[in-house]
Amino acid sequence: MQNSSSAGFDFPWPQKGDQLVSATGGHVLNAWFSGRTDLIAHIEGYKRAADLIWQQIESEPRAAGIDFLVFPMVFLYRHYVELCLKDIIAAGIYLEMGNGFYPATHNLGDLWKSAREYLERIEPGGSDETLASMTEMIAQLDQLDPGSFTFRYPISKKLLPTLPQNGGLNLALFHEGMEKMMSFFDGCECMLSEYKRNLGSD
């Protein structure tokens, strides 16, 4: 295959010696990894990326390519939820056992069941109504994308369509629900951080 210059076009083309992975130069666009082993940076990163996609869709739905951007947006928000649940579980284990880790599963239903149990034990006076509402929304998200596969690939490992033909998703309604879950997770993070600080000061 000819490169772009020899073919008479002017656009980027792979060349021998190109560098894809580097952290040299101290450039303002260098991203730096903190080396942290908790999930905070990943949670924030996936949420911010999804928020940016939503802002673009909301401002110009058709010009933004809503039928294309639905896939990364929903995947990023779903992964954000998954990481938040795992963070709650890790915090719960830390508070009860002195170390914290999270399960490897992508099953939102199982993760929420475990996270809810920790929240109820750590903060027994919490709102049952709020937890019930979260249970409903997590179940809907889990039904939409049961294994973190639906919005990454058009077919499953069994070669079946991951989404129904001619189906649709109201992204405004989806984002509204996500904002409510974000507020809940932010509240959980503040509460659990306070408990961990108190445990560390004892």
Image: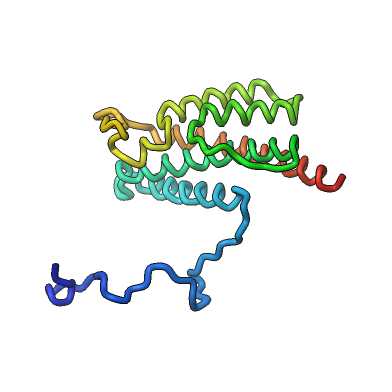
Residue 111, given in percent of the width and then of the height, sits at 56, 31
Horizontal side, residue 54 vs residue 184: left or right: left
Observer-nearest of 191 and 82: 82
The residue most toward the right is: 202
Asked if residue 4 is positioned above or below residue 34 in the image, the reply reads: below
Percent x, y of residue 170: 38, 32
**Of 80 and 171, which appears nearest the observer?**
80
Q: Quadrant of the C terminus?
A: top right
**Quadrant assignment, res 159:** top left
Instruction: Name the residue at 52% across, 42% down.
Output: 80
Nearest to the observer: residue 98 or residue 142: 98
The colour scheme used to paint the residues is rainbow
Is 43 placed above or below 112 here?
A: below
143 or 91, nearer to the observer:
91
Q: Residue at x 41, y 44 (%)?
A: 73
Quadrant of the image occupied by residue 70? top left
Q: Is residue 182 above or below residue 42?
A: above
